Image (cartoon, helix red, strand yellow):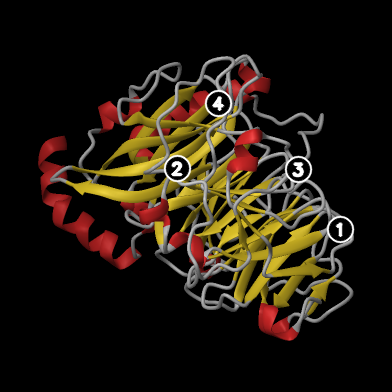
């Protein structure tokens, strides 16, 4: 990931933040601000634990990237998610940005062997997560059976439940879990995309947790010990799995990977070679389609639409997001996107489709902004509520400006689809650690216009009475 460039960004961070804070009661249904001692590079929702009248309790995974004075950690937290139309406007606007939110409570700490660059949960069992660090290996954790650790200087690393080997160089960011099978996908500095099946391990975790023996009799490629790239004794004690397939086609570091939502055999990848590549494991280890010039710079992120498998999003260091239709993609030359979304003034770091509405997606960038887009709104001349400027880019309908520095990662909540968790590295601009925010825009912004107007009409007599 590239660091921010030296270009000025009017208005200043403080001015932008102050303006955003004054608009919170108008634009948000709920917002929780959680100050982090250390920067976090990844955040993910886990399983829902409990439902109540006014809020639900849910697992939340995040990382702590330390300076070495204490160990790096994978944090398992419990989060109270306030239900829509419950929080009072005064409450959500009166937070202390230097404090930790009462809605987020640390449940368990796993001492991670190296920085946690990325966290991804297994859709078939969201208690199983994969992590990337500065090594060639992918680490698999059962966060429920892992012991809770105290992160103090000199503490030994936690032992992963499984180590996935196959990369020849560090694999730091590109990581994905398959929606339909327990498959893991990774990309790295060795310019390769690597695929694993963890079926045999997942099926025996409940009975074999804590054992250093090979889990499961069906896993012929599972080995009890291995010398890993990190040289960590705890990793050497963990069972390892070799790859199901290795896919070559990139000319530079692979920055992100994603499965086709309907197939364990189809996936895509993007990298610092400006390429978008589509793969099919059934046809071999070479690209099915290789778009040589998907963007004008490095590609940092990619996502495949879970509700319409023809649409793929890419985000780049050229500050733009592009939407491609895979039916129109051909190898070589420039990509032909359906649309180019230009609403950031720095490199785009993360893109993700909404789990709820097929035309909606989010993008976050080094400019500290998280934009929410609806490609069906392109061509709609009405001003975009909450976007922050009168002449917003086509398709942009909400701009979250609550972070002071680059937003490394965010995740839509599948259990509460318009609720988002986002993390930023605020060290450069504030001298602090990081910020985690959980937020939901007010539903008048995204609900169908006719529905909103009908509701407002019903309230009209009440509003007139109150103001007369």
Dividing the picture into quadrants, the one containing residue 135 is top right
- Distance of mark 4 from mark 2, alpha carbons? 13 Å
Q: Position of residue 460 (x, y in %)?
A: 17, 51
Which mark, by number, is residue 434?
4
> Marks 4 and 3, Cα distance to the nearest angstrom?
29 Å
- Give how far across and how far down residue 388 sits, in percent: 53, 41
Q: Which residue is mark 1?
A: 273
**Upstream in sequence: badge 4 or badge 2:** 2
Nearest the viewer among 158 and 64 is 158
Residue nearest the observer in this picture, 344 or 10: 344
Estimate how packed mark 1 is, as few (under 14), some (14 to 19) or many (20 or more) residues with alpha carbons within 10 Å: many
Which of discs 3 and 2 lies nearer the camera? The answer is 3
- The circle drawn on residue 229 is 3
* Label 2 element class: strand
Q: In terms of sequence position, does the residue under pointer 2 or pointer 1 come before the other?
A: 1
Mark 1 / mark 4, whichever is N-terminal = 1
Percent position of residue 63, x then y: 53, 34
């Amino acid at each position: 990931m590239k660091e921010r460039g030296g270009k000025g960004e009017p208005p200043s961070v403080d001015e932008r933040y102050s303006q955003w804070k004054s608009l919170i009661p108008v634009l948000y249904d709920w917002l929780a601000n959680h100050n982090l001692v250390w920067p976090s590079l990844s955040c993910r929702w886990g399983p829902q634990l409990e439902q109540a009248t006014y809020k639900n309790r849910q697992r939340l995974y995040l990382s702590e990237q330390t300076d070495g004075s204490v160990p790096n950690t994978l944090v398992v937290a419990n989060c109270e998610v306030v239900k829509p139309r419950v929080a009072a406007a005064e409450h959500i606007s009166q937070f202390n940005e230097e404090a930790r939110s009462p809605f987020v409570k640390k449940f368990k700490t796993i001492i991670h062997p190296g920085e946690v660059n990325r966290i991804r949960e297994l859709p078939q069992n969201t208690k199983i997560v994969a992590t990337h660090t500065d090594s060639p290996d992918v680490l698999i954790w059962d966060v429920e059976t892992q012991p809770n650790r105290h992160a103090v200087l000199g503490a030994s690393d936690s032992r992963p439940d499984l180590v996935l080997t196959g990369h020849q160089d560090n694999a730091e960011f590109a990581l994905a879990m398959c929606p339909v099978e327990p498959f893991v996908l990774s990309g790295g500095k060795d310019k390769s995309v690597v695929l694993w099946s963890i079926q045999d391990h997942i099926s025996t975790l409940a009975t074999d947790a804590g054992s250093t023996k090979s889990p499961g009799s069906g896993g012929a490629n599972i080995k009890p010990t291995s010398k890993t790239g990190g040289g960590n004794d705890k990793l050497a004690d963990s069972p390892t799995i070799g790859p199901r397939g290795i896919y070559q086609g990139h000319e530079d570091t692979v920055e992100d990977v994603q499965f086709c939502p309907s197939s364990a055999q189809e996936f895509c990848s993007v990298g610092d070679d400006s390429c978008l590549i589509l793969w099919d494991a059934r046809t071999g280890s070479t690209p099915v389609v290789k778009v040589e010039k998907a963007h004008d710079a490095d590609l940092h992120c990619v996502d495949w639409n879970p509700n319409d498998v023809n649409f793929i999003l890419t985000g780049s260091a050229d500050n733009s997001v592009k939407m491609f239709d895979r039916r129109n993609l051909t190898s070589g030359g420039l990509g032909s996107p359906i649309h180019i979304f230009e609403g950031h003034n720095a490199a785009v770091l993360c893109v993700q489709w909404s789990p709820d509405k097929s035309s909606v997606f989010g993008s976050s960038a080094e400019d500290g902004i998280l934009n929410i887009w609806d490609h069906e709104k392109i061509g709609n001349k009405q001003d975009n509520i909450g976007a922050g400027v009168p002449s917003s880019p086509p398709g942009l309908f909400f701009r979250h400006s609550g972070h002071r520095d680059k937003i490394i990662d965010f995740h839509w909540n599948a259990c509460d689809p318009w609720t988002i968790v986002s993390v930023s590295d605020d060290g450069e601009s504030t001298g602090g650690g990081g910020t985690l925010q959980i937020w939901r825009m007010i539903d008048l912004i995204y609900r169908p216009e006719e529905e909103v107007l009908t509701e407002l009409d019903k309230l009209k007599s009440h509003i007139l009475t109150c103001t007369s």
